[in-house]
């Protein structure tokens, strides 16, 4: 399973990329808005210069025409740009139009497996089920990943990837992988938490103490 960073913060992206584990980046309007005073296009282009992989940029139109217009524009910014559209009937229309023009899409805000099936049939490159937000309402988010993986596996014509999104904990990464996700997009904080273990820290301390005390 691949790891993407869910962030528009260039420092975080630079740091995570330097670990050698990043295969792509996802952004959304909330993450872009958090980076005060930055221009959307130049942020996406800067990210694309730091990470050689799919970079999701999200449309804000509600109608298919608007999504297609925005998507065509984003696709000119960099060949690695993936156009993110919401899982709505208008989003499906935009996906099928963009796909026919060779523009890759990420269908986001997926909360059930029919949404994921329809996005794949419309020609989505990836779908983004929101694991954490499903857990937040007391339902099992990982179960949705499992269902989508089962459904996609049954149709050899589907090559849409499952991008597990709204990741809140290192456990979500592990369980997404085991449930059949191709990608997990993670906030930087979750990447840091994933590398933290008290036995690693105490092990380093012990090795250093023994090294210093050697004869
Ligand atoms: O980028 C979409 C998704 O990962 C958002 O996560 O934490 O806002 O539910 P969250």
Image: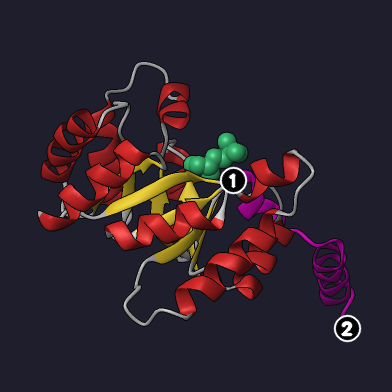
Residue 8, x across and y down, in percent: 42, 36
Q: In this view, does 133 lie above or below 69?
A: below
Residue segment shown in magenta: 187-215
Res 53 visible: no
With 102 as the anchor, is 176 left or right in this view? Answer: right
How many neighbours does mark 2 have within 10 angstroms: few (below 14), some (14-19), or many (20 or more)?
few
Query: The C terminus appears in which quarter of the rendering?
Result: bottom right
Q: To which residue does mark 2 refer?
A: 215
Residue 78, x across and y down, in percent: 16, 48
At a point 61% along the width and 54% down the height, the residue shown is: 191
Q: Is residue 17 above or below residue 208?
A: above
Q: To which residue does mark 1 refer?
A: 166
Q: Distance between the residues labelled 2 and 1?
A: 52 Å
Q: Is residue 96 above or below residue 27?
A: below
Give the quadrant of ligand 1.
top right
How many neighbours does mark 1 have within 10 angstroms: few (below 14), some (14-19), or many (20 or more)?
many
Residue 9, x across and y down, in percent: 44, 36
Q: Quick check: is 200 in the magenta stretch?
A: yes
At a point 31% along the width and 78% down the height, the residue shown is: 157
| Element under disc 2 | loop
Q: Which mark is residue 71?
A: none
In this orientation, which residue lies closer to the viewer: 7 or 137? 137
Residue 32, x across and y down, in percent: 40, 28
Q: Specify the quadrant of the image occupied by residue 164.
A: bottom right
Res 61 visible: yes
């Amino acid at each position: 399973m691949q790891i993407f960073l869910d962030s528009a913060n260039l420092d975080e992206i630079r740091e995570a990329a330097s670990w050698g584990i990043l295969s792509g980046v996802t952004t959304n309007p909330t993450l872009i808005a958090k980076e005060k005073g930055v221009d959307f296009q130049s942020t996406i282009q800067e990210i694309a210069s730091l990470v050689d992989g799919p970079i999701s940029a999200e449309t804000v139109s509600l109608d298919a025409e608007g999504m297609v217009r925005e998507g065509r524009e984003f696709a000119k910014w960099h060949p690695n740009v993936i156009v993110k559209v919401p899982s709505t009937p208008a989003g499906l229309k935009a996906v099928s139009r963009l796909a026919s023009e060779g523009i890759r899409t990420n269908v986001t805000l997926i909360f059930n497996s029919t949404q994921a099936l329809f996005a794949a049939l419309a020609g989505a490159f990836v779908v983004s089920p929101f694991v954490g937000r499903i857990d937040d309402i007391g339902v099992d988010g990982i179960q949705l990943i499992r269902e989508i993986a089962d459904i996609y596996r049954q149709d050899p014509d589907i090559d849409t990837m499952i991008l597990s999104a709204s990741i809140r904990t290192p456990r979500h990464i592990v369980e997404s992988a085991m449930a059949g996700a191709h990608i997990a997009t993670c906030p930087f904080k979750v990447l840091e938490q994933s590398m933290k273990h008290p036995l690693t820290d105490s092990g380093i301390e012990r090795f250093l103490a023994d090294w210093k005390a050697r004869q």
